[in-house]
Image (cartoon, grey):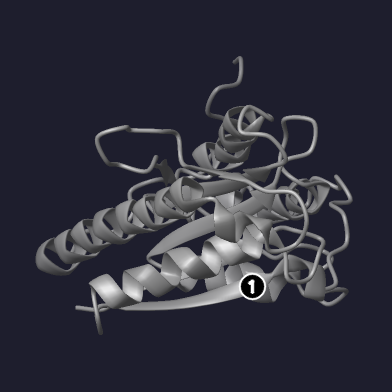
Amino acid sequence: MTVRLLGLNCSPRDNSNSGIMLETGFEKLDATYPGECEHSVIHLRDLHIEPCKACNVCGKKKDGTFIPCVREQEDDVQTILDAMVAADGILVATPVYFGLPSDLFSKFIMRTRPLRHQDFKLANKPVGVLATAGRRSGGAETAIIATWLPFVRNGCLVVGNGDGTCQFGAYGWAGGRGHVLSDEWGLEQAFQTAQRVFKLAGVIKAGVEASGYENYMTFSYSQGTRT
């Protein structure tokens, strides 16, 4: 069984420390589990991403018909959404700005709303976060937790790094481009987080294949509203 992982690099910079953490995590995963993991990385900075129009149209009509985002033909977002749905697990890498993920992440993640309304197409996918800050205590934890929240709303399963320290994810410490390569502990956490996503995604995929399980989550406009 091959597990397919998708990396989302949310840094606006090329050759970024966030991207290095993501690639390092995948490289060590390949070395540890040869032939068991397929992975790809999408660099959001390279794509055209329009902001959500807040039109409240996308996703699903009240009769159950799925409808795409009204901006489907205007930018590259649908390509990213398709890759997320096809993946067994997702790793997100982001720089930390004021204790939060990048505005590029925030701009993109709002566009996943159609997947939530289309009966939670991302449900039960493990998601891990790698955050890179200029200081070891520079807001990585809050950035990771803030990154989790939209994925929880999409029905995903957020994970930490999964070893004995049981951190929220990977905390990279870096200044200029490439500086994260000197942060051995941050890079080790990147691998641990990637490994956690990989292992959990494998367990879920094996269970689905063995049981014939289908996603039971159905989006309803009436749930959670007053009658």
Residue 87, percent across and down? 44, 69
Which residue is disc 1 drawn over? 42
Residue 172, percent across and down? 58, 46
Residue 84, percent across and down? 53, 66
Is residue 43 in view from this perspective? yes
Q: Residue furthest top?
A: 226
Q: Count neighbours of disc 1 (C-alpha within 10 A) and say few if under 14, some if 14 to 19, many if 20 or more.
A: some
Of 205 and 27, nearer the camera is: 27
The quadrant the C terminus occupies is top right
Residue 20, percent across and down? 60, 65
Q: Residue furthest left?
A: 210
Does 78 appear above or below 216?
below
> Which residue is painted at 45% across and 54% down in the image?
190
Q: Amino acid at mark 1?
A: Ile
> Which residue is painted at 40% across and 33% down in the image?
167
- Left or right of 2? Residue 74 is right
